[in-house]
């Protein structure tokens, strides 16, 4: 029996072993979902749907939308949790950056506020008090001029000259209405004062520094006085008149403490304020008498001549004392004399007529002029003597004995020379 010859055909390869299938297919899928959830916490979770019969069914993982990038299965848990930690770090860094930006912006806002307040304070401190004083004096002068123009009726309304308080027949010391024209000269002088204080050399003048604020207060009080007289507020006008007189006396104190350096300063500062003070001092008498007469105070009319002498005596004593200050306040004396001169005219040709009152008033005028003129003469004489002494202080003293000796020596030296000249001839 013969053996069969083996053929060259290979035996077929065994089929590949298929993957083992377990019964826990859904559990493996759910474990994969859990790993995906750990890698992507925000991934969509399986949706539980409850039917109408009350049974709960779970959506298979194959129907759920997988994440864009799934972590490999062999990735360790620490590496799968790394993106969440990074996001937490980034969120924390962003929160810290936001808080630091808020703090920095708050600091910048506070710094800007502090800088603005400091700049505003520096701007306020940069206001020079002398410049502010100049501006206020100018505004006060302009306001007084406008108010005075309104009081005399240039803008309509009642004129101050028609007021009962200024009537020339109220008392023996009431002047004529023509005396009010002195206000035009005083107003012009105050304009000159305002111009003088704007000179560059007067910016830091201690005289204007002290005097400017007093002048501002005086001008405002004078404006209130004019408006109160125009409105027939007689008692209030008397109070304002007293305050105005006090402020002008304060201005006289500063004028005496710092004398005028030049004649221009004396003409633009001392003269207007002197006229202002002299006129307000004189009208203090007539104003008081008029207010009392309008309020039916009968003691002025029972024996008017006696009270007139008392009032004129007070004006003469106070005016003489003021005019005897410094070099003699001629401007103050002239203003008082101006008012008294119109009293004389009114008592001679007006009502009530009184020749004794006119004579006593003329005597008061003479005394005031003598007081101011004598003071000016004494001061000028003393100044000339002091100037002469200063000029002769550097001259050598005159010694008559030394002059005789020099002459003898001159002649003794001259004789031999003359003899020699004769011999040569």
Image (cartoon, grey):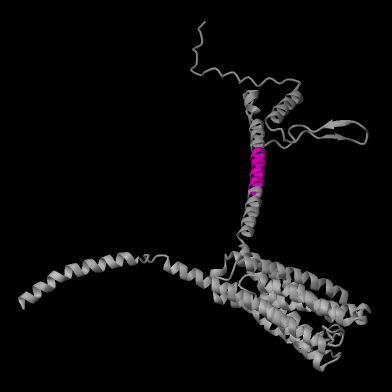
* Relative height, residue 310 to residue 254 (above, below): below
Q: Is residue 355 left or right of residue 380?
A: right
Which residue lies at the image location 91% right of the left edge and 82% below the top edge? 301
The percent coordinates of residue 258 (x first, y second) are 60, 66
Residue at 67% over, 46% down: 106
Vertical placement of residue 299 versus 49, above or below: below
How many marks are shown on the rendered structure?
A: 0
Q: Is residue 416 left or right of residue 276?
A: left
* SS majority, magenta: helix
Residue farthest left in this picture: 424
**Range drawn in magenta:** 94-108
**Closer-to-camera residue (67/150):** 150
Identify the residue at image location x=21%, y=68%: 410
> Quick check: is 101 in the magenta stretch?
yes
The quadrant in which residue 333 appears is: bottom right
Q: Is residue 254 magenta?
A: no
Q: Position of residue 1 (x, y in %)?
A: 52, 5
Residue 312: image quadrant is: bottom right
Position in image of residue 377 (x %, y %) = 59, 76
Is 412 left or right of 38, judged from the image as shown?
left
Q: Is residue 340 above or below residue 208?
A: below
Is residue 241 visible to us here? yes
Quadrant location of the C terminus in the rendered image: bottom left
The residue closer to the viewer here, 191 or 266, is: 266
Let me know if residue 194 appears in the view.
no
Q: Residue furthest top?
A: 1
């Amino acid at each position: 029996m013969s053996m069969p010859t083996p053929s060259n055909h290979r035996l077929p390869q065994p089929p590949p072993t298929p993957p083992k299938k377990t019964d826990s297919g859904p559990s493996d899928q759910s474990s994969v979902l859990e790993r995906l959830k750990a890698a992507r916490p925000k991934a969509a979770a399986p949706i539980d749907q409850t039917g109408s019969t009350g049974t709960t069914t779970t959506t298979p993982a194959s129907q759920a939308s997988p994440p864009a990038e799934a972590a490999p299965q062999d990735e360790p848990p620490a590496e799968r949790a790394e993106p969440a930690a990074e996001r937490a770090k980034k969120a924390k860094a962003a929160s810290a950056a936001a808080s630091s930006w808020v703090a920095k912006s708050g600091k910048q806002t506070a710094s800007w506020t502090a800088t603005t307040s400091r700049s505003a304070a520096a701007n306020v401190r940069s206001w020079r008090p002398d410049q502010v004083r100049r501006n206020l004096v100018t505004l006060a002068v302009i306001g007084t001029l406008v108010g005075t123009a309104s009081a005399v009726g240039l803008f309509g309304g009642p004129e101050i000259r028609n007021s009962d308080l200024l009537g020339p027949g109220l008392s023996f010391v009431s002047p004529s209405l023509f005396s009010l024209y002195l206000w035009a000269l005083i107003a012009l002088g105050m304009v000159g004062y305002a111009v003088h204080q704007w000179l560059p050399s007067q910016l830091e003048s201690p005289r204007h520094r002290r005097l400017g604020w007093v002048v501002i207060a005086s001008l405002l009080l004078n404006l209130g006085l004019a408006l109160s007289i125009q409105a027939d507020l007689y008692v209030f006008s008397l109070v304002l008149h007293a305050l105005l007189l006090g402020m002008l006396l304060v201005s006289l104190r500063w004028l005496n403490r710092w004398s005028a350096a030049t004649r221009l300063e004396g003409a633009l500062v001392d003269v207007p304020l002197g006229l202002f003070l002299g006129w307000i001092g004189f009208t203090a008498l007539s104003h008081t008498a008029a207010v009392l007469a309008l309020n039916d105070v009968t003691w002025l009319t029972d024996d008017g001549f006696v009270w007139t002498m008392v009032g004129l005596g007070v004006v003469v004593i106070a005016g003489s004392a003021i005019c005897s200050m410094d070099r003699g306040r001629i401007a103050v004396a002239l203003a008082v004399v101006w008012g008294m001169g119109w009293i004389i005219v009114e008592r001679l040709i007006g009502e009530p007529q009184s020749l004794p009152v006119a004579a006593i008033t003329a005597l008061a005028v003479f005394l005031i002029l003598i007081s101011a003129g004598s003071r000016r003469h004494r001061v000028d004489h003393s100044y000339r003597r002091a100037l002469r002494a200063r000029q002769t202080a550097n001259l050598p003293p005159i010694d008559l004995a030394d002059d005789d000796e020099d002459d003898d020596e001159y002649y003794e030296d001259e004789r031999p020379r003359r003899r020699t000249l004769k011999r040569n001839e």
